[in-house]
Amino acid sequence: MKKFMSVAFALLISIAGVFAQSPASTMKGNKTPEQRAERFTKKMTKELVLDAAQQERIKILNLDRFKKLEDARSAAAVSKKEVAAKVKQVNEEYFSNVKGVLTPEQFAKFQEMKEEMKEKAFNKKQGK
């Protein structure tokens, strides 16, 4: 009986180890810039009712933004203050470019989306 319990326990531990090592791309916070851009473009398309031309331009802007943000955050010898400044600069450039792609009505709705996302992120941060 002890032998059976030992084998069952070892099997349980090995199975748990397999599930603990899921690929980084499937974990919530570790998506590639391409995956993030695709996901955000789909959300914008749905929420803002983008036409095909707008969708293509927004996808390019989103990909560029997420690549720049990843580069800014992964720079090794940069202080938090410098990272925050770079993120702010990237976001300002992005929002300026997005404004040129969207209609005034779509941009107003986009501003609402942005505020909702800020609030959601703030609430998530407060929950930690």
Image (cartoon, rainbow, N blue to C red):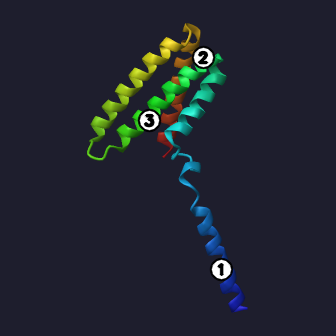
Asked if labels 3 and 2 touch by Cβ distance under 8 angstroms, the answer is no
Is 15 or 123 nearer to us in this picture? 15
Q: Secondary structure at mark 2?
A: helix
Three-letter code, disc 2: Ala
Point out the tag, 3 or 1, that comes first from the N-terminus.
1
In three-dimensional space, the C-alpha distance between marks 2 and 3, rounded to whole angstroms, equals: 22 Å
Residue 81, placed above or below residue 27: above
Q: Secondary structure at mark 1?
A: helix
Quarter location, residue 71: top left
Quarter location, residue 2: bottom right
Badge 3 is on which residue?
67
Question: On the rendered image, what quadrant is the N terminus found in?
Answer: bottom right
- Pointer 3 local density, CA inside 10 Å: few below 14, some 14–19, many at least 20: some
Badge 1 is on which residue?
9
Three-letter code, disc 3: Lys
* Image position, residue 81 (x, y; %): 28, 36
Badge 2 is on which residue?
53
Three-letter code, disc 1: Phe
- Pointer 2 local density, CA inside 10 Å: few below 14, some 14–19, many at least 20: few
Is 12 or 69 nearer to us in this picture? 69
Outermost residue, top side: 104
